[in-house]
Amino acid sequence: MGKIVSSNPFLKEEGIDESKLHVTFLSEPVQNSLKRLEALSSGDRFHPSLREIYLYCPGGYGRTKLSNTAIEKALSVGATTRNWRTTTVLSEMAAKL
């Protein structure tokens, strides 16, 4: 979890509102199907990793077309999406184990 938090490419950009960041955790690695997500992005941004997709949704996650369900359908994998605050709290908890 610590590596996931430290690898978020959006954190290196100026002007990023962390309350608009999310991470989608994928049930398995996906490499070739990510072009399907580009069609859904419409103003939202994403950075894929091997088993995670970092999302930046400036209009809010409730309005994005990059929802968890849409990602699962587009990539044909199971997924779960967490906001950035939850992701960092989970990382802190995992570090204490």
Image (cartoon, rainbow, N blue to C red):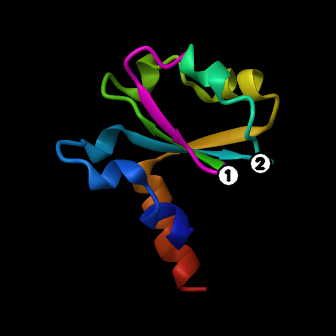
* Residue under pointer 1: 50
Horizontal side of residue 93 vs 57, given as left or right: right
The image shows residue 96 at horizontal and vertical percentages of: 53, 85
Bounds of the magenta span?
Answer: 40-51
Q: Main secondary structure of the magenta part?
A: loop
The mark that comes first in sequence, 1 or 2, is 2
The image shows residue 65 at horizontal and vertical percentages of: 52, 17
Looking at the image, residue 20 lies above or below residue 52: above
Q: CA distance from mark 1 to mark 2?
A: 5 Å
Horizontal side of residue 42 vs 40, given as left or right: left
89, 64: nearer the viewer: 64
Kind of residue indicated by mark 2: Pro
Kind of element beneath mark 1: loop
For disc 2, the neighbor class at 10 Å (few under 14, some 14 to 19, many from 20) is: few
**Quarter-wise, where is residue 70 in the image?**
top right
Q: Is-magenta flag for residue 73?
A: no
* Residue under pointer 2: 29
